[in-house]
Image: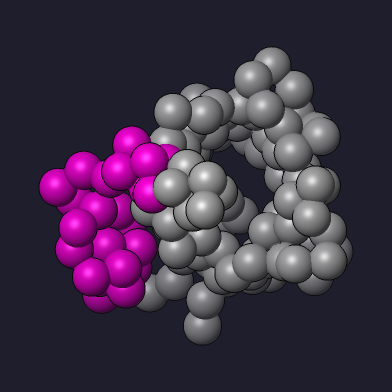
Amino acid sequence: DPEVRASHVLVAKSTNESTLLPRRDHLQNAASPHNGTAVPKQAFDGNYVGQLVQDINPLEPVRVQFSLERNGNHVTGTYSVGLGVGVIEDGTVSGNVLNFSWRWGGTYGYGVMRVTHDGRGFEGTWGFEEAKTGGGRWSAYRKP
């Protein structure tokens, strides 16, 4: 199956030694500055879990986990949909909006996230290459 083979290639391209740790440990501890400390109160900082929906297949959402680190208005981190670990880089917060770039398995793009109305999570869009939309949507809430 060509799609299965392609997914294996993408997983390999998005894997490095740090991502070979058990997923729970990697996303909750290794990439997070909050090891064993209280959950941060600042938006776009900490561990989140939610859904990713691709525009090409909107009826099949997948689970996504984020581990974000915010320093002032700058955000970096990782995300996982079970096929390797992607990177959130060059994120900048302005008010309740995070604009960022992402990389995963040789692909890249941009995105935008907005804090949810209840303040417990975020939702937004992502796109391929120079676009912030057109790839899909994701939403997540802070892990308890």
Q: Seen in the image, is 81 located left or right of residue 52? A: left
Give the residues drawn in magenta, as a range: 7-36
Colour theme: one colour
**Residue 96 x %, y %:** 75, 45
Q: Quadrant of residue 35?
A: bottom left
The residue drawn where x is 75% and y is 22% is 131
The residue drawn where x is 23% and y is 70% is 22
Give the main secondary structure, helix, strand or loop, of the magenta stretch.
helix
Residue 137: tell me if it is visible.
no
Residue 65: tell me if it is visible.
yes
Q: Which is more toward the observer, 126 or 12? A: 12
Q: Is residue 14 magenta?
A: yes
**Residue 78 x %, y %:** 42, 48
Q: Is residue 93 magenta?
A: no
Q: Residue furthest front?
A: 1
Q: Above or below — where is 126 with respect to 39? A: above
**Residue 46 x %, y %:** 46, 60
Q: Above or below — where is 73 with respect to 53? A: above
**Residue 18 x %, y %:** 18, 50
Q: Seen in the image, is 116 located left or right of residue 8? A: right
The residue drawn where x is 30% and y is 43% is 12
The residue drawn where x is 80% and y is 33% is 133
Q: Which is more toward the observer, 108 or 43? A: 108
Q: Seen in the image, is 69 located left or right of residue 3? A: left
